[in-house]
Image: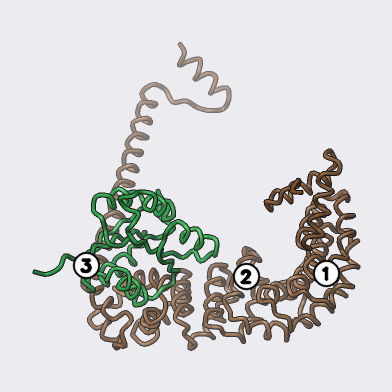
Chain colours: A brown, B green
Amino acid sequence: MIYSIVKNFFFLSGVIIPSGKNLLFILTQIIIFLSIVSLLLIAIVLIIRLINSYDEKRKNNFLSKWEKGFYEYLGSPDNPTKLLEGVKRSQYKYLLMVLRDLFSVLSGKDLESLKRIVNETPVYNFLLDDLKSNRTKRIIRAAYFFGASGNQNVKSILFGHLYSKKTDVFIFCARALARINALEYATAILHAARYQRELSTDILISILLEFKSVVCNYLLERVVFEDAYYKRIAIQIFHFHEFREAADEVIEIFKTSTNKKLLVECIKYAGAIECIDAIPHLWEHFEHPDIEVKTASIEALAKIGGSELVPIFIQRLYEDSYEVNIAAAEALLDLGEKGINLLKVVAKSNSDSKAAAIARMVLSENFIEIDDE
Amino acid sequence: MSAAKKKIFYAEDSDSLIKLMTYKLQNEGYEIIVFNTGEEVFEKAITEKPDLIILDLMMPIKDGLTVLKEIKSNPKTDSIPVIMLTTNAEEETILKALEAGALEYITKPFSTAVLLAKIKKIIG
């Protein structure tokens, strides 16, 4: 009865339900099909596990024989080629795993020994093949090792990968060039970075910071001719290295640019290097309509200016913008005793006002008592 | 009769580094007991009384600084010299570890030769 009702319902809806025997047959077929699929999946999982355990066994066998000699070699003046005698190319991946772990934790003679394995043994050609291949994993691995071992011979190949469509390839190759300190490619990295949609500014900066500080000279040579993106990143690098030689160029950019992000970086740089020449321009931006620009100006002036700025910062405590208020309170703190005393007065003045609340908050965050007299 | 080997506890979560340091320390004639987490170091230190403990700061389950504080706050273990070996080079962290009683604070990357020299200087 129910079956016929359901059947009629589906029939009316355009779905044909098979009759009793046919339904049973179809269900049996489905169950058999699902069982076969399940068995196949189980077989695939078992095969993968078998391959993995075989590989693990091979790795352990290899390392148990190789590691003793490797540990003896580390830090010694011995020829690293001996270490590779009898090691098959298919086993290089295991020794590279060990090298990768140790490259980041060892220094001194130990690190030199690791570099020599990459640069002076058949491992070099193995990694070179990887770097020339078109497989992401292999390129990344090779770029890491050539970067870590400071290999100067592969710079042009690394450069070729900077325009790869894969962000990972760009990141590893750019980082390798930076670690090698291939200064002539610093600008190329910045240019190529524009084509990497998934690349964050933070990662790009972290790559450029792997260069030695002398990279600032290279970036400075081009900064006038390049666009806002280049300028913004370059100024952040100047800021990090407190590179004062860029002050004139940065002030020039500061005077002419209307790009808010770029202005903020100029202001932060001026504050960090305590650039007195930037003070008149910082004053101009004190009334900038953008809160981020205004806040950065207050912070920079606090670093460069003296106690004559106290009344101006006090005034900024009463503005509408919360960010500007905080920056002004912190600026007063940076100015020393006079600024702190006035901040205390504000904190005690009117307990309901926003300025008083912010003054109290900034003082307490810096462990300064309000009623200490 | 030969003198008993000096015993070193080494708490570290990197297998490659554990193997390397175990080899180097055993080669220098030390007995080395390895811990992959910071959990058991303190309890074992009470019973085993090592001559030196090398602690990584960042370890799973219990971090190195907590273990260091446990060691230095117990009269049974407070005299055991502790070397911190870690990637964290922040001034604040270094000060915290030294204030908590660490004898040395070595940052990674480090030289195994320098570490061995410091160990020799501390426990002979």
- For the point 76% across and 58% down, the residue is A333
Query: Which chain letter matches label 1?
Result: A
Classify mark 3: helix, strand or loop: helix
- Give the alpha-carbon distance from disc 2 to disc 3, as whole Å: 40 Å
Query: Which sits in the foreground, A28 or A85?
Result: A85
Which residue type does callout 2 highlight?
Answer: Leu
Q: Nearer the viewer, mark 2 or mark 1?
A: 1
- Give the alpha-carbon distance from disc 3 to disc 1, as whole Å: 67 Å
Q: Looking at the image, is mark 2 or mark 3 earlier in the sequence?
A: 3
**Residue A46 horizontal/vertical position (percent):** 28, 50
Residue that carries the numbered disc 3 in the rendered image: A61
Classify mark 2: helix, strand or loop: helix
Query: Which chain letter matches label 3?
Result: A
- For the point 53% across and 23% down, the residue is A10
Q: Looking at the image, is mark 3 or mark 1 earlier in the sequence?
A: 3
- For the point 52% across and 72% down, the residue is A172
Query: Which sits in the foreground, A52 or B15?
Result: B15
